[in-house]
Image (cartoon, rainbow, N blue to C red):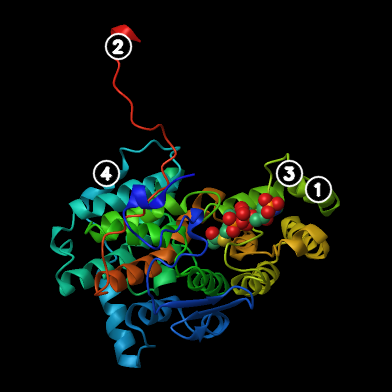
């Protein structure tokens, strides 16, 4: 038995909470989640209303500033973001250091972290103006860097930003245009993409956002903090889940094989889990999955794509929702379950899925980082531990061991 008082001083409270399942690390006014009811609000606005009626840039403004913008505020914000879409030309050289077959998330970790070496005039976290410029730069440059990561991986030349296009259209254009032929932007695809960005913009203290806050709590510059968030997001239990979910659906292949995979997910001796199912906070339908389930049908119908993966996903959802194991453990589809189906229909390789998540989540990371920096209660994040190693002992010289 560990004597807490001996180890940690005379304290009345010391919590051991692996995975922070019941510990709040901060106060935040950005995002509210009621996991039992399946409710998600950004600054009070329901996610389904934002996804159906607003735009990603409007949601970005809302998360950063607390209120929806007026028309002129929105125009000014758009102008600020648009002005920063270019990246330093030397960054192109930086890309060439990566192997062609590098995972685009590996490229994102490196390139976004390197931004602080290019933009010295926005790394002073104590200057509100520099914080604002860094925030705009990160949101504006993320699509450019994400598209460059894609272009690099397929061996095509980089496409410069086109500022007459909207944020999302510009991203699609940089991703899919080639010098010989400009990409024709389909409004259905642009709208679905914008919706996916909205649904991924923020999600309170998830692992990557907590990572950004923890990195930022030491006073690290915002570019380094967002790079830390990208690294955390990459994991298959977090942002990598949409890639894993689509791979799993493809592996299942046809609806008749679903029971075999459900049985595997229930078998405690098998590490397999149904990817895109379950959530730390939602013990009900993830409201984002509801929006995406509808969007998946719309996009595939309108594009005339008949992908058996969607049939497999629908059938899997139905069977899992009726299965006692999933009912007892309150495992429902999460945002990652349908997003992969849509992204794949748009034409993205699975390796880009988490990159798109990172692009969208940058808005939340940046908003949360700003909230933390300006919080008077902010201090360096420094969790404690329960020590389980040996008690004190004397060093034995190498020759005597
Ligand atoms: N398939 C089968 N069983 C599952 C699944 C699943 N997808 N998810 C959880 N369980 C089971 C666990 O085995 C565990 O069972 P036990 O109590 O018998 O040991 C129980 O449900 C609780 O699971 P935990 O891992 O303890 O729950 P936690 O809240 O820590 O994990 C997580 C949540 C990581 C999302 C988990 O549900 C999971 O791994 N899901 C698959 C990956 C995924 O879709 N991730 C995306 C999350 S959303 C996002 O990041 C945007």
Residue at numbered disc 3: 268
Task: Give the alpha-carbon distance from disc 3 to disc 1, as whole Å.
Answer: 10 Å
For the point 29% across and 7% down, the residue is: 399
Task: Give the alpha-carbon distance from disc 4 to disc 2, as whole Å.
Answer: 45 Å
Q: Is residue 142 above or below residue 188?
A: above
User: Residue 134 vs residue 294: left or right?
Assistant: left
Q: Nearer the viewer, residue 397 or 333?
A: 397
Is the C-beta of the residue carrying label 3 under 8 Å from the nearest atom of ligand 1?
yes
Q: Quadrant of the C terminus?
A: top left
- Residue 395 is situated, as x and y percent measured from the top left of the image, at 29, 20
Disc on the earlier residue, 2 or 1:
1
Residue at numbered disc 1: 263
- In terms of image quadrants, where is residue 383? bottom left
Is the C-beta separation of discs 3 and 4 under 8 Å?
Answer: no
Secondary structure found at label 4:
helix
For the point 46% across and 43% down, the residue is: 103
Q: Nearer the viewer, mark 3 or mark 4?
A: 3
User: Residue 259 vs residue 169: left or right?
Assistant: right
Disc on the earlier residue, 4 or 2:
4
Q: Nearer the viewer, residue 134 or 274?
A: 274
Residue at numbered disc 4: 94
Residue at numbered disc 2: 398
Q: Nearer the viewer, mark 4 or mark 1?
A: 1
Task: Give the alpha-carbon distance from disc 3 to disc 2, as whole Å.
Answer: 44 Å
For residue 371, the mark is none
């Amino acid at each position: 038995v560990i004597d807490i008082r001996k180890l940690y001083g005379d304290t009345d409270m010391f919590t051991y909470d692996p995975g922070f399942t019941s510990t709040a690390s901060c106060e935040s006014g950005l995002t509210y989640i009621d996991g039992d009811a399946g409710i998600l609000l950004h600054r009070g606005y329901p996610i389904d209303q934002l996804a159906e009626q607003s735009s990603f840039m409007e949601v970005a403004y809302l998360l950063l500033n607390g209120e929806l913008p007026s028309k002129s505020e929105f125009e000014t914000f758009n102008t600020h973001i648009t002005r920063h879409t270019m990246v330093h030309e030397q960054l192109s050289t930086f890309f060439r250091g990566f192997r062609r077959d590098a995972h685009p998330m590996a490229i994102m970790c490196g390139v976004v972290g390197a931004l602080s070496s290019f933009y010295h005039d926005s790394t002073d976290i104590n200057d509100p103006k520099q914080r604002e410029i860094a925030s705009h730069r990160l949101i504006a440059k993320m699509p450019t860097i994400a598209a460059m990561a894609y272009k690099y991986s397929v061996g095509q030349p980089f496409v410069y930003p086109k500022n007459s296009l909207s944020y999302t259209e510009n991203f699609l254009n940089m991703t899919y245009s080639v010098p010989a032929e400009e990409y024709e932007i389909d409004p259905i695809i642009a709208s679905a993409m914008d919706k996916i960005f909205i649904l991924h913009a923020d999600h309170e203290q998830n692992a990557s956002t907590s990572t950004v806050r923890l990195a930022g709590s030491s006073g690290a510059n915002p570019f380094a903090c967002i790079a830390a968030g990208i690294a955390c997001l990459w994991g298959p239990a977090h942002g990598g889940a949409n890639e894993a979910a689509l791979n799993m659906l493809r592996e299942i292949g046809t609806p008749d094989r679903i029971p075999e995979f459900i049985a595997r997910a229930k078998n405690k001796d098998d590490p397999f889990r149904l990817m895109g199912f379950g959530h730390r906070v939602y013990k009900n339908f993830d409201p984002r999955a509801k929006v995406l389930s509808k969007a998946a049908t719309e996009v595939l119908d309108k594009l005339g794509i008949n992908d058996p993966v969607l049939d497999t996903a629908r059938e899997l959802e139905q069977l899992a929702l009726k299965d006692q194991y999933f009912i007892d453990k309150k495992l429902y589809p999460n945002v990652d379950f349908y997003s992969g189906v849509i992204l794949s229909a748009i034409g993205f390789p699975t390796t880009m899925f988490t990159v798109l998540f990172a692009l969208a989540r940058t808005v939340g990371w940046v908003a949360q980082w700003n909230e933390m920096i300006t919080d008077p209660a902010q201090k360096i994040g420094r969790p404690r531990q329960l020590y389980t190693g040996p008690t004190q002992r004397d060093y034995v010289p190498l020759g005597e061991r």
